Amino acid sequence: MAVTVKTFASSNEAAAALSSDRAARYLGGGTLVMRALNEGDVSISTVVRTNDQTLTRIDASGPRITLGAGVTFARVLAERDLAFLHAPARSIGGPAVRNMGTVGGNLFAPNPYGDFTVALLALDATVAVQGGFGARDIPIEEFLQSRERQAGTLVLSVSCARPASAEAFRYRKIARIKPKGGSVITLAAHLPISGGRIAGARIALGSMAPTQIRARAAERALEGRILDAATIAAAASAASEGTSPSDNALGSAWYRREIVGVHLRRLLSGQE
Amino acid sequence: MSKTPLQFRHNGREVAIFVDGGTNLLVALRELIGDMTPKFGCGQGGCGTCSVLVDGELYLSCLTLAETVAGRSVETLDSLKQGPNLHPLQRAFADNFAAQCGYCTPGMLMAAKALLDRNPQPSRAEIVEAISGNICRCTGYEPIINAILAASGGRASA
């Protein structure tokens, strides 16, 4: 079925068009929306686009980095200052998907996708959105919890603080096909160290709930502690608490609950 | 539903067509331009057989909204033909038995071309990464990797 494609010069106009039409969907890199159209998704009658260059900007020079929603994973990988995000970017798709798929689109990618968002969640990112009533910043966790209602808003950018060290941020995607494949589970950990102890632990999980979630019980087990074997064991045993994974072709809910602690232990202890 | 005029460069030649809203680049190439070299596989971005180059970058044509290539350069497998001769990549695929049923081959060749255009002497690992978005259900990938190595002057058995 043919849809109406509306292309705008500015993100403001695109946001207005998006918020005024429930059957409109924003087209970024196309890996989600074109797929839906190819599958005959009749809920989409209008496709909204913009050529606004501000959406493709990368600001990676300072302690806080900002990625425009239209930045592709290939561009993240080409940016030396974004080395801490290279592992999540590289874990997505093949080269063609990385040339097309965008940081903003990944926020809407359902399971078993959305791996980059797992990394952003562990980094306490902020999502800048433009709705019918202007622009605002939303903490990524809040954004994900209300993702269903965000379809009418336009994501402009995501930003987060650069981790203090390479050691402080870790990422692991479990897939059945390497180097490409949907996620069985995806894990990201941000463990800032203050005075030898973990301060502000963040553990984010993908494919363990309808959207990416934080493993708060595991975070509590890590907070204020030294990252030793006992702490890691406590965090690993708490990893599945509060999760609600589903069955899909890549793994069952039971399997995901069984392995999430194993992989969290490996991630925290630096094992391959 | 009105049609949208669309002009772009197809294998070095300017083309002008009219597309329906939401038409993907694969449909535009196959049904409106008549270039049957990119194949329809999954329509989901999972198989890679529709791979083409847009301004030199590897794209999945089935997930590319046709009108987004306005004014840009699109290269398909058809751009590799050199009169009666095979392109060196095609020759290497034939010599190394890298095609069996052949359905993945157009995408594999374009993914290989995208790699070699940027990195003329890739390592085996870089080749594996470069074709990781392309599914082959016949060959087990080894002959394809060997063919790309051979085309880049590397040792096929490395």
Image (tube, coloured by chain):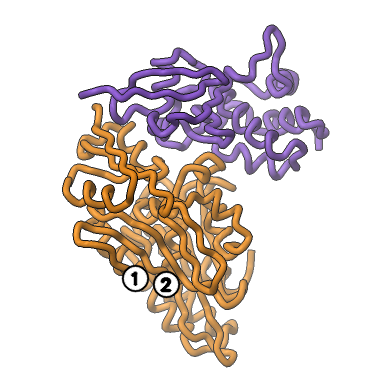
Nearer to us in this view, B23 or A109: B23
The answer to whether residue A44 is visible is yes
Depicted A127 relative to depicted B50: above or below: below
Give left or right: position of A127 versus A76.
Answer: left
Q: Earlier in the sequence, mark 1 or mark 2?
A: 2
Nearer to us in this view, A268 or A53: A53
Report in which chain the residue with disc 2 lies: A
Q: Which label belongs to residue A139?
A: 1
Depicted B52 relative to depicted B83: above or below: below
Outermost residue to the front: A9
- Residue that badge 2 annotates: A124
Type of residue at label 2? Asp
Residue at the image point whose x is 28% and y is 48% from the top: A14
Is there a contact, CB below 8 Å, between mark 1 and mark 2? yes
Q: Which chain is purple?
A: B
Residue at the image point whose x is 57% and y is 30% from the top: B136
Name the quarter where the C terminus of chain A is drawn. Answer: bottom right
